[in-house]
Image (tube, helix red, strand yellow):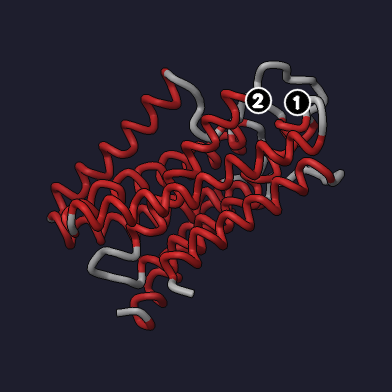
Amino acid sequence: MPLSVFGPLLATLIGVAAGALGVYARIGPVRRIVPFSGGLLMGISVFGVLPELAQMQGWAAGGAFLAAGVALLWAVSRYVYPVCPSCSHTHEHERCTTVLHGFAFPLVAAASLHCLMDGLGIVASQQGPAHGLAATVVAGVTLHKIPEGIALGIMLRAAVSSRFAAFAWCAAAEGATILGAVLELALSDRLGVHWVAYPLALAGGSFLFLGFHAVHGEWRRGAPAFVPALTGAVGAAAIQQGARVFFP
């Protein structure tokens, strides 16, 4: 199976499985993996996506592209709706018992946008000059899908009337990862290789924003966040260097 298909499919399956755990299983807090995966996403953005953008556009333009991706995600999350509500520090989704009537649609819409960018970023990372970035992005996105999917399942379970409906909505949101991959493949075929910088910058900006958001949320809750986040960032750098050796 081509990596362009395998990566988004793996991330989607992990997200759906994690969502099923959130909907059907009685599980404890999933906070330990949240700051680690957040640090991993930020590390991928800094050590993987930024050098890739610099190779394509130069360091100044690459940094500006990445900053624009962060700014866009911040604006949407601040003024429209949280792009990653499942990572939000404003809601205790691990112990959610409140019935969130009317919350399902905006939650699914925001989570779908987040997953769409995951799929977009996975495929875009495979089309740049350094193909080793693809393995790093798949690893980071897939790991982040675990706490994301569990939290999404828990919150949807409290927002709709049945567990099956909650799981169906969760699967639909996570399925947007595949849609993002298909969209990137279609647009890159039509617009050429120069198009890759734009979805890659958007994905890198989203990784940086969401990673910081996840770590900051855990820190505000009083949970240990700095060391797991630093470990994740160092892990991203190590994975990226290893990927460059095996996938030059």
Residue toward you, 116 or 36: 116
On the image, numbered disc 2 is attached to which residue? 104
In the image as oriented, which residue stretches furthest toward the right?
26
Q: What is the CA distance from the residue labelled 2 to the residue labelled 1?
A: 7 Å
The amino acid type of the residue labelled 2 equals: Ala
Label 2–label 1 contact, CB within 8 A:
yes
Q: Percent position (x, y) of residue 74?
A: 39, 29
On the image, numbered disc 1 is attached to which residue? 160
Q: Which mark is residue 134?
A: none
Q: Establish if 160 lies above or below 212.
A: above
Image point 38% across, 83% down: which residue?
246
Question: Number of callouts in the render?
Answer: 2
Query: In this rendering, would 96 be left or right of 141?
Result: right
Residue toward you, 7 or 61: 7
Q: Secondary structure at mark 2?
A: helix
Q: Establish if 42 lies above or below 103.
A: below
Image point 67% across, 26% down: which residue?
91
